[in-house]
Amino acid sequence: MRFKTFPGGVHPHDHKHFSASAPVEEFPLPKRVVISMSQHIGAPSQPLVKVGDEVKTGQKIADAGGFVSIPQHASISGKVTKIDMFPHPAGASAMAIEITTDGEDKWVDLVDDENFLQLSPQEMKKRIGEAGICGMGGAGFPTFVKLSPPEDKPIDTVILNGVECEPYLTSDHQLMLEKGPEIVSGLKILMKTLSAKRGMIGIEANKPDAIALMKKLLASEKDLSVVPLKLRYPQGAEKQLIYAATRRKVPAGGLPMAVGVVVQNVGTAYAIYEAVRFKKPLVDRVIAVTGSIVANPKNLRARIGTPFADLVEHCGGTNAPIGKAISGGPMMGFALPSLEAPVGKGSSGLVLMSQKEAGSIEERNCLRCARCVDVCPMNLMPSMMVQAVKADDLTLALRCGLEDCIKCGSCAYVCPAHIRLVQWIDRGKIRHAAAQRGQK
């Protein structure tokens, strides 16, 4: 079998054995959920309910705050008990709606449209938009917006991202094994809404069972194919996946639509299937709770807004003190100040590390070894970029590719001086964004 890939990248130990073979388990109904208004890229959602209101599971409780935004829905039935600032799965705080369960899980009315693939593209897009779906691989870009490219940017290819290249994470892998036909239906819906002629599913080589299953499901589909990919991080990054699968290069500062491609996560495709067939809003997702100190690592289907602490308790707690808790994977995820933060629509995993694993190493001076340049999948010069940021020279940092950096962490992973390259680059991006806002 030939495996495709991209230039650069690294191969960190994947640590997937903790939860790789754990089937998806339904997490019990939580006592309370915290639905963040900022689970996505774009304008925050706007609450439609007030404290004291009774809500049903699937009921819309917040409207989209603009075109680049999404609505939010109650993930349990019960009473709205608070609307305030709460911990966010990205590590900060954000406005959120707290709901306390009534223990009954009363749903809004759903449908079962067996002829869902015969719906018009407009109706499909409407159902996707109303379901509050955003990218579930971590980026959180509103799916409805992704399915609305400009007329001068026709899309001919849809790629489903089943790579899951981050260490530890296994939720997408298990979802593909258990919901393969539904994911394929989600791909067909995406292709129809975009009038795309070709569909692909990219899967990394460390998931041979998922590759085999998807190939079997697509055996009779002439316009759909599986793309086996070499084991390399960040193979699942959008631009790297597009290049590996199609050999098309997204231009610097450009979007995938510039080369006629739309990429969606396999979890997003499954949510799209549920939204279009059943009119089911995005109120739950599969999340891996994993790490060396988790007593019983699991892949859980949990309601959006469930506190991370509840998931850890369900997995038997930990067998050692927590050194670091990460929402997402260790390369691009967010360190959590506490486990009170809730599961978000982009929460693919919760990784718990021991104090020894999380121990920091003192940063030293750059050795000029150029390892960061060798592994950068965007062909940038991270060390020079960081020196420019430290010197507050944003002009030089931008010339070095500040805006093109995807913050994958490959540079920091190989740096023998242990320089916190990603944090410095992120600081530069924040300064640049602030400067741009000041010019408007």
Image (spheres, rainbow, N blue to C red):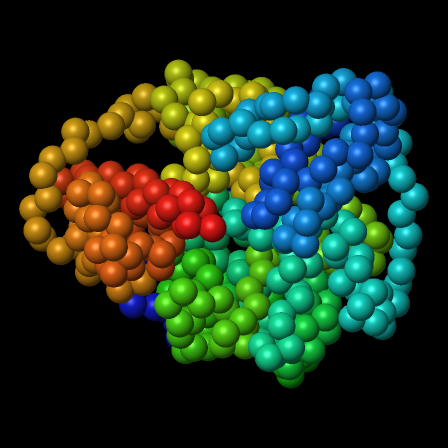
The N terminus - image quarter: bottom left
Vertical position of residue 225 compared to residue 289: above or below: below
Residue 181 x %, y %:
71, 62
Q: Quadrant of residue 330?
A: top left
Q: How many marks?
A: 0
Residue 381 x %, y %:
21, 58
- Does residue 100 appear to the left or right of 155 in the view shown? right
Vertical position of residue 126 compared to residue 391: above or below: below
**205 or 426: nearer the viewer:** 426
Which residue is found at the position 87% from the left and 36% from the top? 107
Residue 336 x %, y %:
45, 27
Residue 37 x %, y %:
65, 36
**75 or 47: nearer the viewer:** 47
- Does residue 119 appear to the left or right of 312 in the view shown? right
- Does residue 230 appear to the left or right of 148 in the view shown? left
Which residue is found at the position 74% from the left and 55% from the top? 129
Which residue is found at the position 68% from the left and 40% from the top? 45
- Does residue 132 appear to the left or right of 402 in the view shown? right
Which residue is found at the position 71% from the left and 27% from the top? 97
Vertical position of residue 336 compared to residue 64: above or below: above
Q: Is residue 173 visible?
A: yes
Q: Quadrant of residue 215?
A: bottom right
Vertical position of residue 224 compared to residue 170: above or below: below
Q: Is residue 308 visible?
A: no
